[in-house]
Image: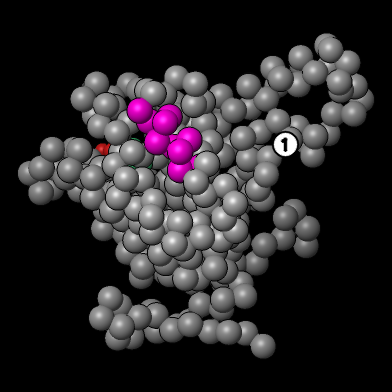
Amino acid sequence: MSIRMPFFNNRHEPIKETLTEEIVLEKVPEHVAIIMDGNGRWANRRGLPRIAGHKEGMEVVQRIVRVADKLKIKILTMYAFSTENWKRPKAEVDYLMRLPKMFLDKYLPELIEKNVKVNVIGELSVLPPHTLQAVHQAMEKTKDNTGLLLNFALNYGGRNEIVKAVKQMVDDVANGKVAKEDITEELFEQYLYTHNFCDPDLIIRTSGEKRISNFLLWQSAYSEFWFTDVLWPDFTEETLKEALQDYQTRIRRFGGV
Ligand code: FPP
């Protein structure tokens, strides 16, 4: 039998009529990945500097972690900084690099209390020491947690990840660890940052843009996509539930019939 959960707003009243439908908890996607876009526009519209949008975006991350935890989503991957984001003005990049520490200083105790496991994927070697230290510490402190896996993509690029995997595999063929004939999709996946997790079932992108922007290129082969005009800082529990509700209407065939 399905367990059903009605939609509620922050005041715990059922929310607007179009959302009175329910989420089937048994059919909640295991892995949800989010391209958090629109922070800059959110700030511009309020006459604020772009970094104000990123700060509000950081608060929304924690609000969505709480919802994901409640709905028993297993993995939440958040695109926090791409390999292309270094092209932004230095002050904005510096701020984005400070956000993980700001977030973890403020919310790590709550994440621990919620049994959340923190993880990071991306090319971490070039991150500033203060960023690395904060994420390593959070990973260490939560490594035995068994609840939601909160996975930040930080200095992440899908093409970079694939090229890095190819190079490692070529090394392993050269040093005899792997035979060319044994290379399969399953083996290749072992070389990706995401080797420990399932592929994303649902990828959400906010702010009206409809592109993948180098996010989880290999892993998204059979993901469902959901786009919304809502800017990331305005993204709420209801927006996530709207995405999940839509996801639950999809028939996933994985190439079959
Ligand atoms: C894209 O919006 C957003 C980013 C490049 C940064 C995303 C980061 C966060 C939401 C905060 C991350 C939080 C933690 C805890 C690390 P944009 O700036 O490109 O927006 P725009 O398209 O409106 O200019």
Query: Which residue in the protein does label 1 denote?
Result: 189
- Asked whether residue 247 is drawn in magenta, I would say no
Image height of 6 relative to 49, above or below:
below
Residue 6, horizontal then vertical, whole percent? 43, 84
The answer to whether the residue bearing label 1 lies less than 8 angstroms from the nearest atom of ligand 1 is: no
On-image quarter of the N terminus: bottom right
Q: Report which quarter residue 237 is drawn in.
A: bottom left
Judged left or right of residue 72, residue 44 is: left
Q: Please give the range of residues in magenta.
A: 130-139
Residue, x 69% and y 17% (percent of image)?
167
Image position of 17 with respect to 152: above or below? below
Where ligand 1 lies, by quadrant?
top left
> What residue appears at the point 50 percent right and 46 percent down from the top-left corner?
141
Q: Where is residue 94 in the image (x, y as percent from the top left)?
A: 27, 26
Mark 1 lies on a secondary structure that is: helix
Q: Is residue 230 above or below residue 48?
A: below
**Mark 1 residue type:** Glu
Q: Is residue 29 above or below residue 105?
A: below
- Which residue shows up at 40% across the image and 84% down it? 20
